[in-house]
Image (tube, grey):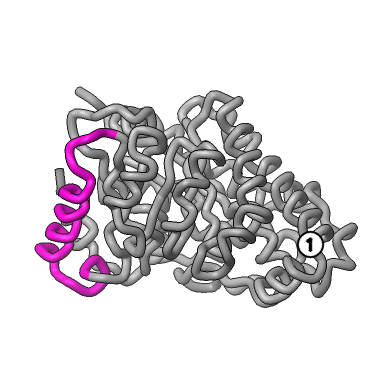
Amino acid sequence: MVTKRELVQMALELKKPPRIPVALLGGGAWAVRHAGTTFAAIKNDPERIAEVFVRFCRLVGNALLWTGSNFLNYPAHCLGVPIKDDSADSPALEGTVLQSLDGLDQLSVEKVLRHPTMQAIIRSHHRVADQVGKETFVMPTQWAPFTLAARILGVERLLMASIEDPDRLLRLIRFATDLIRSILEPVLDHPDIPGTNFSDPVASCDVISPAAFRRFAAPFLAQLCQWVKAKGKYCEIHICGNTTPLLADLLTIGPHAFSVENKVNLKEAKSALGGKVCVVGNVSPTGPFLSGTPAEVIAEAQACLKAWGDDGGYILATGCDFSNQVPLENMLALMSVK
């Protein structure tokens, strides 16, 4: 019998699996809420973090599990910015690490790695893989460099720096790249963690131009993809919003998979990437999935399957992370689609 992990691996290798793998991308906040706890209550305990994700995975039957989902702001918190995490809502930074690029030399990778919260999160990925990694494709997720730089500096200052101080902004993005690699280095050592995802919402065409993406985001994504591949692991990239103008760039960046939101026409994504990069998506996380009926969720998912067609290299999934208020029956409806 083919495992869900094997189905995902076949899709990432652009093969046609015996059935389409189905996944709920993200879901950390939903899992924390469903477990009846808060991020603050579990963030320093790798066993409790893992318990939340394993429970979520087994409940919904996820083929591809983004471990660490909604824990992505903690590296910036470990650099010194307060965080609001006393609920099951995604932890929110209360400010920025830097007020200007004058503080670049104050940033320290080691400060993050030594922090007990970061140590707990790193170890939690391994705990999840120990329990479900044989049957589920466990894929830790991190912010991509451009978005992590925005968390450190603030989105508005980052966008201004892209025009007024691009050289120092590139230094900050290089630091973010080094920090991400340092966090993932011990995580990816686990034999049942076969790959990783990089989420880059601030690099969306809804926020920056394609030209800015090519200068400030794409080169660093490419570096990380090359590094992940050199470790014999799989690399996925997710960018929110309308990424249609960036599809051709993905061929140069070189991930195994690209996750697209419902703003992207799936037929266009297939035309640009089919047979070259696995496409993941793109059931809307805010449409029927959030507030409709199971039948409506199934109908939208089947429309995605029809748009993609019979070729391999595709994973049916939500187009982005989703609210912790999504009804369980809608999640199970999506997971039932074949």
Q: Is residue 185 left or right of residue 193?
A: right
Q: Report if residue 306 lies within the magenta region.
A: yes
Q: Quadrant of the N terminus?
A: top left
Please identify the quarter of the rendering in which residue 3 is found. Answer: top left
Q: Residue at x 67, y 41 (%)?
A: 181
Q: Which is the main secondary structure of the residues drawn in magenta?
A: helix
Q: Could you tell me residue 91's position as x and y percent?
A: 55, 68
Placement of 50 over or under 28, stated as above or below: above
* Residue at horizontal 70 percent and vertical 41 percent from the top: 182
Question: Amino acid type of disc 1?
Answer: Pro
Left or right position of 175 against 148: right
Q: Disc 1 designates what residue?
A: 166
Provide residue 192's location: percent of width, then percent of height: 46, 29
Magenta extent: 288-312
Q: Nearer the viewer, residue 136 or 302?
A: 302
Q: Residue at horizontal 24%, vertical 66%?
A: 289
* Front residue of this view, candidates 260 and 138: 260
Q: Could you say which is closer to the camera, residue 319 or residue 212?
A: 212
Residue ID at (45%, 50%): 247
37 or 53: nearer the viewer: 53
State which quadrant residue 315 falls in. top left
Q: Decide: is 163 above or below 120.
A: below
Which quadrant does the C terminus fall into? top left
Q: Secondary structure at mark 1?
A: helix
Magenta stretch contains residue 220: no
